[in-house]
Image: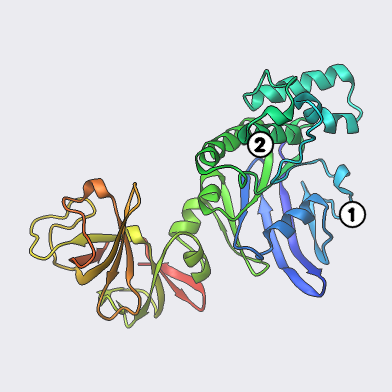
Amino acid sequence: MSVAVTIDGLTVHLSGNKILDQVTLTVPAGSFVTLLGPSGSGKTTTLNVLAGFADATSGQVLLDGRAIGKLPPGKRDIGFLFQNYALFPHLSVARNIEFPLLARKVPKNRRKELVARVLELVHLPDAGPRSVRSLSGGQQQRIGLARALVFSPALLLLDEPLAALDKQLREAMQIELKRIQRETGTTTVAVTHDQVEALSMSDLVAIMNNGRIEQVGTPEEVYRRPATTFVARFLGEANLLPVRSGRIEGLGLPADGLPDGTTVIRPEDFLLSRPGDTGPATGPVSGSVAGSVMGTVTAAVYQGARLRLSVSVPGCAEPLVVSAVPAELPVQPVAGDEIGVRLRPGGLRTFQDGSAAGPL
């Protein structure tokens, strides 16, 4: 049965340092929520308090409205998947998975049934007799997950679960983890510093910074509508430009209706044009220079799915970061080219005192 998790005013001091500062978060029943932030932001400490591995200085954690702060880890009905999976190398796959069931004194026949069921869930139905030493990294990750789920915990905690995998396998396991979470319906809280991982797997993302939560939202919300300049800078790449008197300084483009502050412009929010082009805009390259600001390409880096450009524009202190789809460009720009940039309509935000003020 899925349960909701409530973190209410959680504060943690360790060795005289404030690690968590009034962290409050609601995890809806059956959802996948990821704590995302830089090193030292407090995400792992939050996970450890949930698991019972660390004590809160103040505040509380509730599982379906029931405070669990005084319960030891083994009494919290929580499954935990560590970064290194913590498998026993001298035991078979099946014996590893049934370990939590032995601790709960589950009868032998029932243990066998539960192990078989969870091996099917992780798509390794015949792996039970094998040694864990014979498994690949991705298979070990699945067995670690199977062990965390075999007793049907109310809450699943994932601590950097994919960090030890190579890029290709990590991307495949993002899909698998989300599939398994959806099939089981287990409320899940994960910790990662990998932005793509968080955006790919999560129903909600909680962005942490200096022991506090800066923003909670869907992956699209935190990326497209960041609540603070920290979130805008931390998630992907962003061009942050001042807005004064209804115009974006440096670009000289209108920002009608927005208060003075700082606007965030993602690299994909730009359209490109070349001097002398005419006709309607098509794709990422405008067919008209009208409404564009001219600049000089200082760097052009091919990254497969996109072309990343640095464009120096008179009046801007820093080069603009612009991205385009290479296949849609008639001629790919190179360093030294003169090029025009203009804004796609909508999607921009202005910040005042670190908070979002509204769309452009």
Q: Quadrant of the C terminus?
A: bottom left
Mark 2 vs mark 1: give the one in front.
Answer: 2
Identified at 51% across, 66% down, the residue is 227
- What's the distance in space between the residues labelled 2 and 1, CA to CA? 30 Å
Camera-side residue: 355 or 194? 194
Identified at 48% across, 63% down, the residue is 226
Q: Position of residue 34 (x, y in %)?
A: 61, 51
Pick whichever of labels 2 and 1 is earlier in the sequence: 1
Disc 1: CA contacts within 10 A as few (<14), some (14-19) or many (>=20) = few
Q: Which residue is mark 1?
A: 70
Q: Single out the residue that lies furthest toward the bottom.
A: 245
**Colour treatment of the image:** rainbow
Report if residue 344 is visible in the image.
no
Disc 2: CA contacts within 10 A as few (<14), some (14-19) or many (>=20) = many
Helix, strand, or loop for circle 1? loop
Left or right of 203? Residue 60 is: right
The amino acid on which the numbered mark 2 sits, given as a three-letter code, is Gln
Identified at 88% across, 19% down, the residue is 108
Q: Quadrant of the N terminus?
A: top right
Q: Is residue 359 above or below residue 98?
A: below
Q: Position of residue 272 (x, y in %)?
A: 22, 60
The amino acid on which the numbered mark 1 sits, given as a three-letter code, is Lys
Q: Which residue is mark 2?
A: 141
Report if residue 258 is visible in the image.
yes
Q: Is residue 118 above or below residue 338?
A: above
Helix, strand, or loop for circle 2? helix
> For residue 242, which quarter of the picture?
bottom left
Q: Position of residue 90 (x, y in %)?
A: 81, 31
Left or right of 246? Residue 236 is: right
Camera-side residue: 220 or 134? 134
